Image: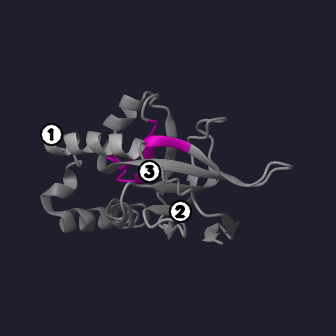
Amino acid sequence: KDTSDLEKQCKTVYTHRCLLYRFSPKVGDTPATWIVRGKGDVKIVQDIASQKVNLLMHMEKTLRTCLNAIVLPSTELTANSGSDRSWLFNTIDYADFDEPGVAKQGIFLVKFKTKEIADNFKEKLDKYKVCNAEGADAVSVVEEEEGTEGSKSEEPTKKEDDKKSTDKEESTKDTKDDKPAAVTATNDKPTTE
């Protein structure tokens, strides 16, 4: 489906710019490594009809989908030992570049500009992941906690847009490269070494 069609079926409950990595395990002579999946806005979106919550991300310039994952109630964000502004998580992704639409288990890392933004992402994801477990009851609880703002998507104001474009310029100048720490996957839960 077209990206715009999918966006119309969902309401955005959180969005912010980040860098997404995917962990590639050792295969043959190729060592295990982190691969940059894309830079763009990661979104927590909620399907209007089913109330299910997904993580969705498109690359900035090409708009190619680089993350499309159902947020499972068991999804845990784990702090990355190399940075306080990034989170590791294990999920099933439907946006594999080689086989789009095919479910593939993977370990991902989202890296944000600041610790505050990263903490806000974790807070929102933890709040909305219960919607996929408990259905309508959880949805009403989440909306009650947020008041009337819970039913609206977080649309940035003009002032926030100007700040966001400034942040983009600054983040491209960021010379400090704090790649994710090495990860070992055991029992579907990532651990840092």
Give the residues drawn in magenta, as a range.
37-59
In the structure shown, which secondary structural element does the residue marked by tag 3 occupy? strand
Q: Secondary structure at mark 2?
A: strand
Was residue 21 drawn as part of the magenta stretch in this picture? no
Foreground disc of the pair 1, 3: 1
Q: Nearer the viewer, mark 3 or mark 2?
A: 2
Tag 2: residue type?
Leu
Question: What secondary structure is found at the residue carrying circle 1?
Answer: helix
Q: Disc 3 designates what residue?
A: 55
Q: Quadrant of residue 148?
A: bottom left
| x and y percentages locating residue 169 in the rendered image | 34, 40
Q: Residue 101: percent from the left, percent from the top?
A: 58, 38
Label 1 and label 2: CA atoms lie apart by 31 Å
Sequence-wise first label, 3 or 2: 3
Q: Is residue 20 left or right of residue 162?
A: right
Of 157 and 140, the residue lying toward us: 157
Q: Which mark is residue 158?
A: 1
Q: Quadrant of residue 90?
A: bottom right
Q: Is residue 45 magenta?
A: yes
Crowdedness of circle 2 by 10 Å Cα count: few (<14), some, many (20+)? many
Q: What count of labels does the image hold?
A: 3
Quarter of the image for the C terminus: give it.
bottom right
Give the residue pinned by disc 2. 88
Mark 3 or mark 1, which is nearer the start of the sequence? 3
* Badge 3 amino acid: Leu
Placement of 174 over or under 76, stated as above or below: above
